[in-house]
Amino acid sequence: MLVVQQLSHTFLSGTEPTQVLSGIDFRVEKGEMVALLGSSGSGKSTLLNLMAGLMKPTEGSILIAGRNIEKMNENDLAVFRRSHIGFIFQSYELIPHLTVRENVELPLVFQGVKGKVRRERAISLLSRVGLAGKTELFPSQLSGGQQQRVSIARSLITEPAVVFADEPTGNLDTKTEEEIIDLLIELNMGHGITFVIVTHEHEVARRTKRIIQLRDGRLVDPDIQAGEGA
């Protein structure tokens, strides 16, 4: 599903190289829910950008759905991301002048899916994430937790191979955080959706099935077993 092999990355600051990732090896199987845990400066944001194909690694390989994404050109990567990778963002990244349903439909617009099919799939997904009856509202009419549910539905609309969730509860209060993680667990266990949740919060990481922990650009232990989400 997702295989990261001997991944290293170095930034150049002037003429001085700074290595931010070194020798990263792990795999995420189809249907897993894994936390990528690390504090600020650990390298987790860089690793996420590499896995999402937003940056090219200095060394190593990244396979998603059997494809080496680090070998793709920008056009092929854009097409691949649209079909195989879903994103959930900390700040939701919803388009304010589009309705909830239209925000969820948007990835299918870029795939050329017909309007009736887009609408039906979006409404079905919004119902699945607990937003039935709110499809024609605008993001500003929703709470933060509800906006994140829209973001989750949008991430699933293309039936991606893997969904990357970047600090998905970072803007939420404790109760809403628990509700969102409960929803992700339900989607993972009930529908087999593969999630990689990037977080600095141990409480969030412990809800997943497995923790991949980064410290100073290296893996601490790629096989830490988490608890409640398993």
Image: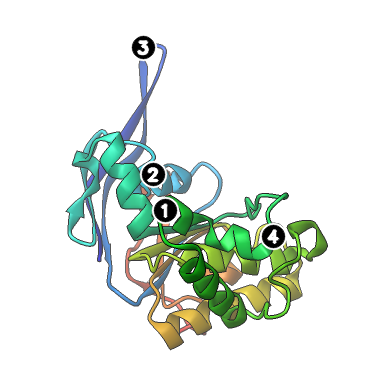
Find the distance from the CA under tag 1 to the CA under tag 4: 38 Å
Q: Earlier in the sequence, mark 1 or mark 4?
A: 4
Residue 7 x %, y %: 25, 45
Residue 136 x %, y %: 72, 67
Q: Residues within 10 Å of mark 1 (few under 14, many from 20)?
A: many
Mark carried by residue 217: 2
Outermost residue toward the top in this view: 15
Task: State left or right for residue 144 relative to residue 27.
Answer: right
Which element carries disc 1, helix, strand or loop?
A: strand
Find the distance from the CA under tag 2 to the CA under tag 3: 20 Å
Q: Name the residue tied to disc 4.
A: 99
Q: Earlier in the sequence, mark 4 or mark 2?
A: 4
Mark carried by residue 6: none
Q: Earlier in the sequence, mark 3 or mark 4?
A: 3
Q: Name the residue tied to disc 3.
A: 15
Quick check: can you spot residue 8? no
Mark carried by residue 214: 1
Amino acid, disc 3: Thr
Q: Nearer the viewer, mark 4 or mark 2?
A: 4
Discs 4, 2 touching: Cβ within 8 Å = no
Amino acid, disc 4: Thr
Which element carries disc 4, helix, strand or loop?
A: loop
Find the distance from the CA under tag 4 to the CA under tag 2: 40 Å
18, 81: nearer the viewer: 81
Quick check: 206 above or below 196? below
**Residue at position x 67%, y 63% in the image:** 100
Q: Nearer the viewer, mark 1 or mark 4?
A: 4
